[in-house]
Image (tube, helix red, strand yellow):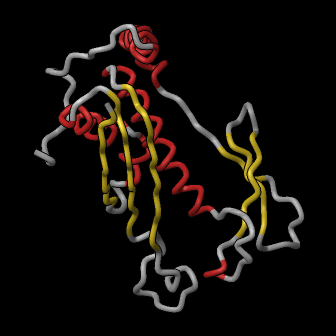
Amino acid sequence: MPNQKFSTKNLKFINNTSIVHQRHKVLNEKYRNDSASAWITDSAEVIGMNLQDPFRTTVSINDKMKVPFKIGVHKAVGGDHDFPNPGDLLCASLASCFESTIRMISNKLGIELFQTEVSANAQVDVRGTLMIDRSVPVNFQSMHINASIIGKNTNEKLLHTLIKGAKHSCIVYQTIKKGIPITLHTNIKIKN
């Protein structure tokens, strides 16, 4: 069963009055009538400042809001690791996308969430990027997600469906897993 493809074909959404269901209903109609409008672009930009400092920069996320984040270089490659590094941002993207996907699907399914906790981590052998060993690839070799969900007034089968749906619908998860393996460990509980 874990290798079966996720499908909503036989799944009845319990909470058709949910805000997610209502918004998706409008978007589904829009995208069916104009498929080009379903294409979006996310963005980030670094404008180099204080270029004498090789270990710190600032990335602005979203081309309209320009939310700034200070970025540092990991100590494993010579930095001070005094700010989040790009690998941390990659993990943050995976964890936040997976958790928000869980929230949206649970809202559509009528699952009341009591608690969610999603963490992501990634492993890389830095000898490749430091050109110490050319046989070591310059990329993360694996990523891992730990997801803990406590749902109220639901059942275990529906919570497993929720996780399966999140794996299927999480854009960042689906993008990254094409390049490197991602393991997923889940801990689901029901609070009555």
Residue 30: x and y in percent read 43, 10
| Quarter occupied by the C terminus | top left
Q: Nearer the viewer, residue 15 or 174?
A: 15
Q: Is residue 192 above or below residue 88?
A: above
Direction from residue 104 to residue 6 in the image, left or right: left
Residue 136: x and y in percent read 42, 83
Q: Is residue 189 something that shows in the picture?
A: yes
| Quarter occupied by the N terminus | top left
User: Where is residue 27, by image quadrant?
Assistant: top left
Identify the residue at horizontal 35%, vertical 34% (top origin).
Answer: 151
Q: Is residue 30 above or below residue 76?
A: above
Q: Residue furthest front?
A: 192
Identify the residue at horizontal 43%, vertical 18% (top origin).
Answer: 20
Identify the residue at horizontal 71%, vertical 48% (top origin).
Answer: 45
Residue 47: x and y in percent read 80, 53
Identify the residue at horizontal 87%, vertical 59% (top origin).
Answer: 49
Q: Is residue 33 something that shows in the picture?
A: no
